[in-house]
Amino acid sequence: MIKKKNVFNANSQGFSGFVLIIISGFCTSILMFWITVYGPGVGPDSVEYIETARNLLAGNGFYTGGKPLNQFPPGYPFILAVAGFFYNGDVLYAGRLICSILFGVNVALLGLAVFICTERSFSATVCAIFIFVSST
């Protein structure tokens, strides 16, 4: 019978590694929010998402450029519109906030996956997080 290891045992290196991974995700979110102070990097897809979110807030539905949004998934514009509703319709600020939070969550999940797969190798986890953050 195979014994499962408890990765999050409070008496082991696992718990401290888990806490450091969560802190690195949080710090990455703050860093991303600080970096995007002058606005997000916007491409053609982003314009469609932002315009659709603004139309949703205006009560026009999932429309972009006067046509229904049918070539892009509607989930992200909906999340942008909901978050923008809480920031007085500022969809760009809501997008900046969502992007920062999700990037930090990605870093934390990557660190956690590497930490578990390498059987709590702290150095491998730190290297993976540095590689992920430096490539963006």
Image (tube, grey):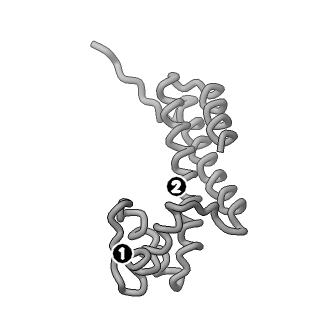
Residue positioned 53% across, 75% down in the render: 91
Identify residue for label 1.
67
Identify residue for label 2.
102
How many numbered discs sit on the rendered protein? 2
> In the rendered image of this protein, does residue 16 appear above or below residue 124?
below
Along the horizontal axis of the image, is 7 left or right of 18? Answer: left
Residue positioned 65% across, 45% down in the render: 136
Residue positioned 71% across, 67% down in the render: 37
Q: Earlier in the sequence, mark 2 or mark 1?
A: 1
Residue type for callout 1: Lys
> In the rendered image of this protein, does residue 118 appear above or below residue 51?
above
Residue 97, x across and y down, in percent: 57, 66
Within 10 Å of disc 1 (Cα), the crowding (few <14, some 14-19, many 20+) is few
Looking at the image, which is closer to me, 65 or 1? 65
**How far is disc 2 from disc 1 in space, using C-alphas?**
29 Å
Within 10 Å of disc 2 (Cα), the crowding (few <14, some 14-19, many 20+) is some
